[in-house]
Image (cartoon, helix red, strand yellow):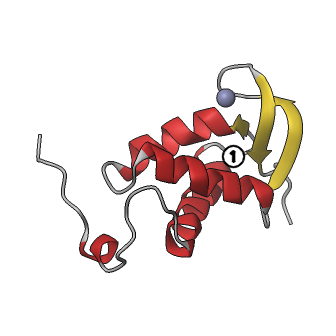
Amino acid sequence: MTPPIWLPYESVGSERQSHVNGTTIELVRREVGKLLRVDSRGEFICSSCLKRIIGERSGTAYTKGQIERALEAVFKSPGALTRKYSFVCDRYGNTMACLGVPDVRF
Ligand SMILES: [Zn+2]
């Protein structure tokens, strides 16, 4: 295993610890969108599963706290994603707020 490496663009901003900047939110939002549109198309996934999945995908780029805060922001303003306040998560079957993209073709 290679040791954790901070990507260059990560160190551009001075704020890295618990504070989440707009860039982190946008990158997490993009990952969530890609996941829900491509890899888990038609699935609705709760925030705790998203946190785990995004954490696995982004490796050491973000801390759990950063992903958590970024996801909170994405849930608050989901944009093109569909938010359900109380829905059965397709991953674990727990009923929570979930995000997804309805499987509709345009
Ligand atoms: Zn879940």
Residue that numbered label 1 is attached to:
41
Q: Judging from the image, what secondary structure is the residue with disc 1 in?
A: loop
Q: Residues within 10 Å of mark 1 (few under 14, many from 20)?
A: some
**Image position, residue 5 (x, y; %):** 18, 58
Between 91 and 16, the residue placed more toward the observer is 16
Residue 84 appears in the figure: yes
Identify which residue is drawn at 19% across, 51% down.
4
Q: Amino acid at mark 1?
A: Arg
With 9 as the anchor, is 33 left or right in this view?
Answer: right
Of all residues, the one furthest to the left in this rendering is: 2
Identify which residue is drawn at 70% across, 37% down.
45
* 35 relative to 96, above or below: below
* 34 relative to 68, above or below: below
**Image position, residue 19 (x, y; %):** 49, 62
Identify which residue is drawn at 54% across, 59% down.
28
* 28 relative to 50, above or below: below
Quadrant location of the C terminus? Answer: bottom right
With 11 as the anchor, is 89 left or right in this view?
Answer: right
> Image quadrant of ligand 1?
top right
Identify which residue is drawn at 39% across, 70% down.
15
Between 59 and 15, the residue placed more toward the observer is 15
